Image: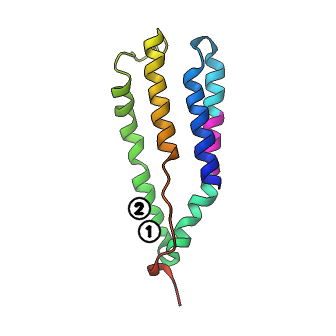
Amino acid sequence: MFVCLSGTLSGLLLVAVGYISCEHAYLAVAVLSVATGFCGLQFPSVMVNHVDIAPPFAAVLLGISNSAATVPGFVAPYVVKSLTPNVSGTALCRDDEDVVQWLAVWFVVMLGLSLRVRTSPGKVGLTV
C-alpha cells in the first residue's frame, strides 16, 4: 500500500510540476520537494522485501538490488537530454516548446514511478 501511495502521489505531483508556469518557480520547487518526500513512503515496504524473500541472504539481495537501483542515476541525465534537445543549461523556461519538452520528462518520471515489481517468498529463503 505504501509503495502504491508513494508512486501515485509522487507521480501526480511531478506531472503537476510540468504545468506550473515559469513565473511561479518557487511553487514548482515546493511541489517537487513534496513529491520527493512522498517517495519516502515506499521504504517501509521495500526494505523488508529482502527479508521476506530470503532471510539468510537478505544482505546480499539488498546489495544487489541497491547496485541495480543506481543505474537510473547515471542513465537519467542522458534520457532528459534526449527529451529536451532545445533547452540550454540555464534557461529552463524560455518558451512554450521548452515547457512541452519538460512536461514529457515529468511524464516519463511518473511512468517510472508507477512501474513496480511484485515479490513473493522464494524457496531458497525458507528455513525449516
Instruction: Classify mark 1: residues with Cα within 10 Å, few (<14), some (14-19) or many (20+).
Output: few
The reply to whether callout 1 and callout 2 are in contact (CB within 8 Å) is yes
Q: Position of residue 94 (x, y in %)?
A: 47, 9
Q: Secondary structure at mark 2?
A: helix
Membership of 65 in magenta stretch: no
For marks 1 and 2, give the CA distance. Answer: 6 Å
Q: Quadrant of residue 51?
A: bottom right
Task: Give, as a three-letter code, the residue at label 1.
Answer: Val
Q: Position of residue 72 (x, y in %)?
A: 41, 43
Is 114 situated above or below 78?
below
Q: Which mark is residue 64?
A: 2
Q: For the magenta stretch, what is the residue range?
A: 34-41
Q: Predominant secondary structure in magenta?
A: helix
Q: Which mark is residue 60?
A: 1
Q: Position of residue 73 (x, y in %)?
A: 42, 42
- Identify the residue at horizontal 43%, vertical 13% (top origin): 97
Q: Which mark is residue 105?
A: none
Which quadrant is the N terminus positioned in? bottom right
